[in-house]
């Protein structure tokens, strides 16, 4: 992989993570309007779901790349 592709990939990861952060902030702001909401518990739960989603996607991508690159590494 050349440096240009690495920069492009880093930008897309940054944009994807930024999008998730914005979604989380919007979700928190909506839930703060509810007087009975336990906001800290809600934020923790939502963040755990986001981390799990990103971790799963990362593992799938690593597995895919390992399978695709394995023949070239032997």
Image: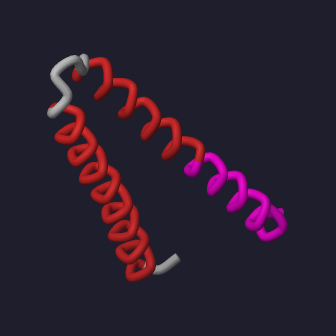
Give how far across and how far down residue 65 sits, in percent.
Answer: 68, 62
Residue at horizontal 47%, vertical 80%? 2
Q: Is 69 a magenta residue?
A: yes
48 over 68 or under it: above or below? above
Q: How many marks?
A: 0
Direction from residue 36 to residue 66 in the image, left or right: right
Direction from residue 72 to residue 12 in the image, left or right: left
Direction from residue 63 to residue 7 in the image, left or right: left
Q: Quadrant of the C terminus?
A: bottom right
Residue at horizontal 22%, vertical 23%? 39
Between residue 5 and residue 48, name the one nearer to us.
48
Give how far across and how far down residue 6 sits, in percent.
Answer: 42, 72
What is the image's colouring?
secondary structure
23 over 29 or under it: above or below? below
Between residue 35 and residue 68, name the one nearer to us.
35
Q: Quadrant of residue 67?
A: bottom right
Over which residues does the magenta segment extend? 57-74
Q: Quadrant of residue 17?
A: bottom left
Q: Is 72 a magenta residue?
A: yes
Give how far across and how far down residue 45 sits, in percent.
Answer: 39, 25
């Amino acid at each position: 992989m050349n440096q240009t592709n690495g920069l492009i990939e880093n930008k897309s990861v940054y944009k994807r993570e930024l999008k998730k952060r914005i979604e989380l902030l919007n979700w928190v702001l909506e839930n703060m309007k509810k007087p009975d909401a336990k906001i800290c518990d809600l934020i923790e739960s939502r963040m755990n779901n986001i981390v799990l989603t990103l971790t799963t996607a990362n593992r799938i991508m690593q597995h895919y790349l390992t399978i695709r690159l394995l023949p070239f590494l032997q």
